[in-house]
Image (tube, grey):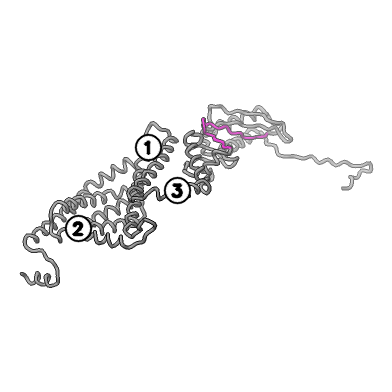
Amino acid sequence: MSPALAWAHAQGLDVPQGAEAIETGIVVALIIVSLAIGLFAGRWLGPHAEALWQRHLGHHVEHFGGRVAAVIRHGVAAFLLAILLVGGAWPPLAEGVIGFFLGAAVARMSIELLRGLNIPRWMAWSVAFFLFVAIFSHSLGGFAPIRATLTAIGFDVGKTHLSVFSVIVALLTVVGLLAGVRLANRLIGHAILSATGFDPTQKLLTQKLAGIAVVALAFFVGIDLLDINLTSLAVFSGALGLAVGFGLQKTVGNLIAGIILLLDRSIKPGDVIVVADKEVGWVNKIGVRAVSVITRDGKEHLIPNEDLMTKEVENWSYTDRNVRIRIPVAVSYDCDLKLAQQLMLRAAAESPRVLDDPKSNIWLTEFGDNGVKHEILVWINDPQSGVGSVRSDVLNRLWVLFKDNGITIPYPQRDVRIVRDELGSAPAG
């Protein structure tokens, strides 16, 4: 025995010798090969997979696309190391080395997956740490004692024993289901948006219903994985129902109202609406609780769905996007009235947003105190761009035309008459 081996045995270290040392060397070589294959797969398949992912999912992948290569690299390495671990009866030291690298590969892959799905960093690293400890300790044959120790640390709640191990399992289950829900929602959302048989409103409604279905499925799967007895939740479900009936009444009402709005398509994303005689706005998004309406000033109003069901709403683009605008104009009594009306039609026709069909029209509405009052009636088909700019453009053009053709715009005038008495003096006061 060499001095180095003798010293190791003296220190209590079990150093493999003979055939065992050869098997350990082979395992180390296979580990290096597995890691090299994983690295090669990540570099070769990663860019192609990332391009395919971006092409089919686009912006719905958030920042997951840039992590595809890392997921492939660590995933391939973990797969090969798992086969190596279960593929033979290796010496204890060799199994420990395989378990270490397998745990590290699985931990790195889980971090890339969870962070790519926008799971918080502390959750991703916690899951990775638990997976590494579980895999590494299992390869050394020490996972059972760790599980027993963590299970013993806890307390009883009724007939249920709440331990550190059960909390860890619950955390892993919740994080896994959360990641699965986010991935499923993005895949389903992209499939729905890519469908050609739905209009935008039907796509939005289908996305909302699919999201609710995915969350409900994840809830029941989590209940089953955690072995939670539903009968023990009877009191809780009763209290939850009571809370929904009172405290969450508005929330549930807004949820149902949003689904009804999407079903009957009375209000759709892109519509131009006026709610309760307030500002005109463009419907940006119909959410679970509220509708996002953006005004021409850039202000975003969140209007509860229930208000759009119970209050009067003007929808300028419900069945037809054409909107008529009234522009009041007055001219003096001593001008050429026919020429003034022709100039009004000309100013409307030269405005770029005014439609040629339906044609613009001029109404004489009143012989006022100071002038002859008209209304220029013009049509536009882009109310989401606002109506004030159309009025401003037509009136600016009309001002120039009136100036060039001698048409005057009246302004208020008052005649003051002074009545004198018989002595020729004005009355006092």
Q: Is residue 145 magenta?
A: no
Q: Which of 410 and 33 is in front in this view?
A: 33
Query: In the structure shown, which secondary structural element does the residue marked by tag 1 occupy?
Result: helix
The disc, 1 or 2, on the residue closer to the chain's N-terminal end is 2
Over which residues does the magenta segment extend?
312-330
Badge 1 crowding class, 10 Å Cα cut-off, few under 14, some 14 to 19, many 20 or more, is some
Against 106, residue 307 (above or below) is: above
The disc, 2 or 3, on the residue closer to the chain's N-terminal end is 2
Do the residues bearing badges 1 and 3 touch, measured as CB atoms within 8 Å? no
The disc, 1 or 3, on the residue closer to the chain's N-terminal end is 1
Q: Mark 2 points at which residue?
A: 139
Q: Name the residue under label 3.
A: 237
Q: Mark 1 points at which residue?
A: 192
Name the residue rendered at 43%, 48% in the picture. Answer: 234
Q: What residue type is labelled 3?
A: Ser
Whether residue 130 is visible, yes or no, is yes
Q: Nearer the viewer, residue 159 or 330?
A: 159
Measure how far apart labels 1 and 3 are at the Cα level. Answer: 33 Å
Q: Where is residue 7 in the image (x, y as percent from the top left)?
A: 11, 72
Q: Is residue 324 magenta?
A: yes
Please state the total of marks drawn on the protein image.
3
Badge 3 crowding class, 10 Å Cα cut-off, few under 14, some 14 to 19, many 20 or more, is few
Whether residue 298 is visible, yes or no, is no
Query: In the structure shown, which secondary structural element does the residue marked by tag 3 occupy?
Result: helix
Q: In which quarter of the image is residue 141?
A: bottom left
Q: Which of 11 and 286 is in front in this view?
A: 11
Query: In the structure shown, which secondary structural element does the residue marked by tag 2 occupy?
Result: helix
Q: Nearer the viewer, mark 1 or mark 3?
A: 3
Name the residue rendered at 32%, 40% in the picture. Answer: 56
Measure how far apart labels 1 and 2 are at the Cα level. Answer: 44 Å
Q: Which amino acid does label 2 sit on?
A: Ser
Do the residues bearing badges 1 and 2 touch, measured as CB atoms within 8 Å? no
